Amino acid sequence: MQLRLEKRSQPSQLLRVVTPIAAVLLTMVLGAIVFTLLGYDGVGAVREIFISPLVNSYKWQDLAVKAAPLIIIAVGLAISYRANVWNIGAEGQYIIGAVVGTGVGLATNSMTGWWIMPLMMLAGAAGGAAYAAVPAFLRVRFRVNEILTTLMLTYVSVYVLNYLVFGPWKSPTSMGQPQTVMFSADQSLPYIIPGTIVQLNAPIAIVVALVAWLVFSRFVFGFQIRVVGAAPHAARYGGFSADRTVWLALLISGGLAGFAGVLEAMGPFGRLVPQFPTNYGFTAIIVAFLGRLHPIGVILAGLIVALSFVGGEMAQISIKLPFAAVGIFQAMMLFLLLASDLLVRYRLRVVRPGEVPA
Amino acid sequence: MTDMPARLALRGITKRFPGVLANDNVSFEVKPGEIHALLGENGAGKSTLVKMIYGIMQPDAGEIFWNGERVTVANPKAARKLGVGMVFQHFSLFEAMTVLENIALGMDSKIPARELESKIRDVMDQYGLKLDPQRIVADLSVGERQRIEIVRALLLNPSLLIMDEPTSVLTPQEVDQLFVVLRQLAKEGCSILYISHKLHEIKALCETATILRGGRLVDTCDPRVETSRSMAEKMIGGNLKTIQKPAGRAFGAEKLVVKRLSMAGSGHFGIPLRDISLSVRAGEIFGIAGVAGNGQNALLLALSGEEPVSDAAAITIDGQPVGDLNAKRRRLKGLASVPEERNGHAAVPDFTLSDNAVLTARDRLGLAVRGLIRPGAAKKYAGDVISTFAVKATGSEAAAGSLSGGNLQKYIMGREILQKPTVLVVSQPTWGVDAGAAAAIHQAIVDLAATGSAVVVISQDLDELLGLCDTLAVINEGRLSKSMKVSEADIDEIGLLMGGIHGETEAAHAA
C-alpha cells in the first residue's frame, strides 16, 4: 500500500475554506498535547486561550482592541502578497507611521480643531508608505529582494523610535521616563461604545477590509494585483506593468501599516513609548495567510489571532503559562495552515500495488 | 523469418493519470528491422506509451515482451541494457560542454575519453553522421544536437530505437538526412519505433503504423497504401475539415509595417532581433517560418508590445507609430496578439474564463469602465466566445486551467478575434492542439483575414504555414528573410533559409 499525491484539475474551493478552520482546530489538539508533555495543564491552556475569552463577555472588548491593528495591517499585506511582493517589514512601517503621526501630534498638541485627528492619520499612513517606498525603489531600480530590505528596515525603525522618545521628543514632565507628552483630547481616538475600551479604530478596521474587498473584486487595480501575482507573463501580455505593481503593493501595504501604527498611538497608547512595538506587524503576516489573503478572511483571522493574545494573557494568570506560549500557538497555526494548503491543490489517494486505480 | 518472435510486443498496456486514461489496453508488436510508426494526436497517449517501454514509467496493467520473453523494464538503465535506445523530443545536453563530454556523461559505464572518441567516430562514419566531437554544443544547430542524441543511442548497439517526434525541430534537408540513417539502421536489423503526427513522413518512411486515439489503439495499417487523409481521419476519429479559403483574394492597404526593428536578446540565451522588416496588408496572412529558438519569442514580444522598443516608428499600425507603446496601448490601436504559451502567458490558469476575458478585452470592449470592472459584460463576452468558437467548457466561470489545450486555445483565439483587431499576431496557433481544434483555429484565422484584418502567424510547422498563409518569410538567428508568395515558394529554398548558415555549411560538407 502506498500514498500518492495527485494534482487536482481545479483547486478545491471547499478546502480553501475548510483548511484554515482545520488548522485552528488541529493547533488546539497539538497544543494541548505539547503543553501536557511540557508539564503544564495542556487542555486547560487550550481552554483558557481559545475558549475563555469567548465565553466571558467582558473580554470581547479586548478582542476588538487587539484585532483592529492586526486586521488593518493584514489587509495591506494580503494585497501585497497577492501580487507576489513579500513585504515582511510591516512592523517597521507600523512604527514609522506612529512616529510620523506623533510628530504631527506634537506640533499640534496645544491646538484644537476637528482637523487634527485626520491630519495625524494621514501623516501616519504617509509615513508608513514612505518607509515602504525605500524597498520599492531598491527592488524596481536595482532588483534588490524586498524580503531582506523590508525586514532590515524594521530594526532601523526601532532605533528611530528609541532615539526620539529618549531624546528630542521626551516629555518635559515625564520625570525622566522615556515617553512623549500625552495626546490631547482632539488627538485621541474617541470611545465608540460607552463603558468599554473599544475605540474608533475597530470600525475603521472593518471599513478598511470592506473597501479592500471591493477593490479586489470589482476594480481593474485589484485585478492587476491578482494577475501580476498569479502569472507575471500574462500580466505583461495584458498590459500591466510589473514595476508599477511592486510600487503600488508596497506603498499600500506600508501605508496601511503606518495607518494602523498611528491609530494605535492615538488610541490604546495615548503617547509614544519605547514599548510601542508589540510585533503586530509580524503577527499580521499570520493573520494575512490565515485569512487566505482575502480581506473578509482577514477579519475572521484577525479575531482568532486576537483571541490567542487575550486568552494567552488570561492563561498567564490562571495557569501560569508563559506568554511565549502564545507565540508557539500562533506559529503552529501558520505552519499547519501552510502544510494543509497542499490539500487544496492535491488530493491524497491510497494506492495498492498491482491495482489499476479506477 | 516468420517464426522469429517480435522484437517488442505489448499486451494490454494500461496507464491511468488523474482524470484521464492515458493508455487503455494497448497491444501491438514491432518486428525486427521494422520501421514502425506510432501515430496519434497530441494527448493520444503516444509519449506515455514509449515512456513505459523505456522504463520511465510503469504500466498499471499489461505486459511487455522483449524477443518473446516477458520483461519488466524497471528504469531507463534496464531498458538500455535490453537494447532499447531512445532519442527524446527535448534534448538533454549541456550547452557549455563539447559533444564528446556530453556523450561521455550519458554513458552507463565509464569509457576512457580516447576510446570513446574513436567509437563515436566509427559510429558516425558507419552512418554518415557528420559531427565534430570536440565542438561546443552551444554552437551547434538543432539538427546537429539531435545527431549527438542519435550517436549516444547508437553507441549502445540498440536493437530498438525510439524516436519521439524527431523532425519537429529539423529543416526539410535535415529530415531527409535523418531518414537515410534510419533506413540504414533498419536494414541492419534494428527496429525503429517512430513517433509522429506528420503523415507524409510516415508514408515515406514506415512500413507499419499503429494509430492511437484517446489512449486506445484504433488501427494498425500499412501507411504506404493508406492516404494521408485516411490516416488523419483515423487519428482524429472523424472527417477532416479542409480550410475554406475564398479564391482570388485581393489585399488592401498596408496595415502592419515593421521597419528595421532590432531588439537586444533578453536572458542568457535570448536571441536578439536584427533589422527585421515586413509589411502585411489588409486581408493578408503572413507566415513566419523557422526552426525553434531563432528569435520567434522575441519577435512576438516585440510585436505584441510586451517588450516595447525605443524607436516608435519601427512598428506602425495603419501608419501610426506604435513601437514604444505597451501591449495595452497597442490593443487600443487595434493590434491583438496570442503568444505560444497558453498557461500563464495568454491566459491565467487559476482565473475564470470571464476574468481571462478582462485580461485583454477590458479596454476595447468596455469590460472595464473608469477602473471599475463590469462582471456582467465580462461574463457575456466570455459566453459569446465560448458559443461562437464551440469551446468545450462548463461556462464562463470555469477556470481556464480546467480546459483541455485545444479548447483553451480556441477560447484565447476567439477572445482576440471577436475584438475585431486590425492586426492579429499569433505564435504557434495550433501547438499541442488536437486536429479538430486546429482546423477550427485555421478557419477562424482565414475568416478574420477575409474581413480585412492583417494576420501574422509565427509557426515552426512549415506545413501549417504553407496551407494557411499567402506570404511567407523565414526567421533565422534573429534575422528575417525577404518575403515570398506561398504560391511561388520553393520548399528547398525555404529549408535552406531555415537552416541559415548551418544549412549552407552542411550542404558544402555533403558536396
Image: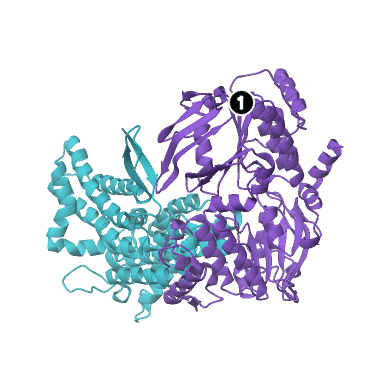
Q: Quadrant of the N terminus of chain B?
A: top right
Q: Position of residue B499 (x, y in %)?
A: 77, 46
Residue drawn at (54%, 63%), measured in percent from left and top?
B410
Q: Which residue is the site of mark 1?
A: B159
Q: Number of callouts in the render?
A: 1
Left or right? Give the position of B208 relative to B504: left
Task: Say what amino acid the circle numbered 1 marks.
Answer: Ser
Mark 1: few/some/many CA within 10 Å (<14, 14-19, 20+): many
Q: Which chain is purple?
A: B
Residue drawn at (72%, 55%), measured in percent from left and top?
B289
Chain A: its colour in the image is cyan
Residue drawn at (63%, 43%), measured in percent from left and top?
B223
Left or right? Give the position of A194 relative to B357: left
Q: Position of residue A225 (x, y in %)?
A: 47, 64
The disc numbered 1 marks a residue on which chain?
B
* Quarter of image, res B170: top right
